[in-house]
Image: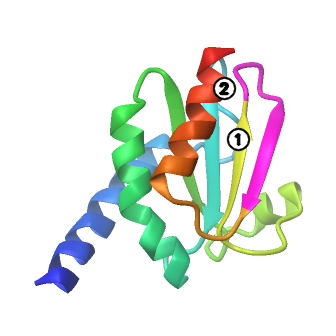
Amino acid sequence: MKKLLLMLMLGLFSATAALAASPQADPVKGLVTVVDLGAKTCIPCKMMAPILAELEKEYRGKAAVVFLDVREDDGPAKRFGIRAIPTQIFFDKTGKEVMRHEGFMDKMAITDQLNKLLAK
C-alpha cells in the first residue's frame, strides 16, 4: 500500500514539476525560487519528490519550486557545477543564488530557507 501511494505521489510530482520547470533552469523572474537538481531514479531524490510537490502547492504564487532531472538533461548540472544529487539551489527574487545544499533536504529546512527569502 505504501509503495502504491508513493508511486502515485511521484506521478503527481512529475506532472507538477514538468509544469514548473523552465527548460533553461533559470530562476522564475520576480519569485523566490528553489531549483532541485536530481534524478527520478536516485533514492534521496525519490524521497524528496512528495515534499517538493507539497511545497509547490503551498508556495504557488509566492515562490517557485522547480525539479530538473539531470540524467535526462545534464545541461543544468553542467551549468550550475553540480557535484552530487540531489542539489537544491535557492535564488532570491532578483535571481541571485543565495544558498546551495547537497543531499536530501527535509521539508522544514526547505520551508525555513524559502520563508527567509520571502521575508527580505
Q: Is residue 37 above or below residue 85?
A: above
Determine if residue 74 is in view: yes
**Which percent across, then down, holds residue 33?**
62, 35
Q: Quadrant of residue 70?
A: bottom right
**Which percent across, then down, holds residue 113?**
63, 38
Dot 1 surroundings within 10 Å: few (below 14), some, or many (20 or more)?
many
User: Which residue is drawn at the image coordinates 62% and 42% (left, top)?
Assistant: 34
Q: Which residue is mark 2?
A: 117
Give the spatial CA distance, label 2 vs label 1. Answer: 9 Å
SS for dot 1: strand
Picture quarter with the C terminus: top right
Residues marked 2 and 1 touching at CB (< 8 Å): yes
Segment colored magenta: 92-101
SS for dot 2: helix
Q: Is residue 14 above or below residue 42?
A: above
Total tally of numbered discs in the picture: 2
Between disc 2 and disc 1, the foreground one is 2
User: Which residue is drawn at the image coordinates 53% and 72% (left, top)?
Assistant: 45
> Mark number for residue 90?
1
Q: Quadrant of residue 7?
A: bottom left
Q: Is residue 5 above or below residue 15?
A: below
**Mark 2: which amino acid?**
Leu
User: Which of these two is toward me, 101 or 26?
Assistant: 101
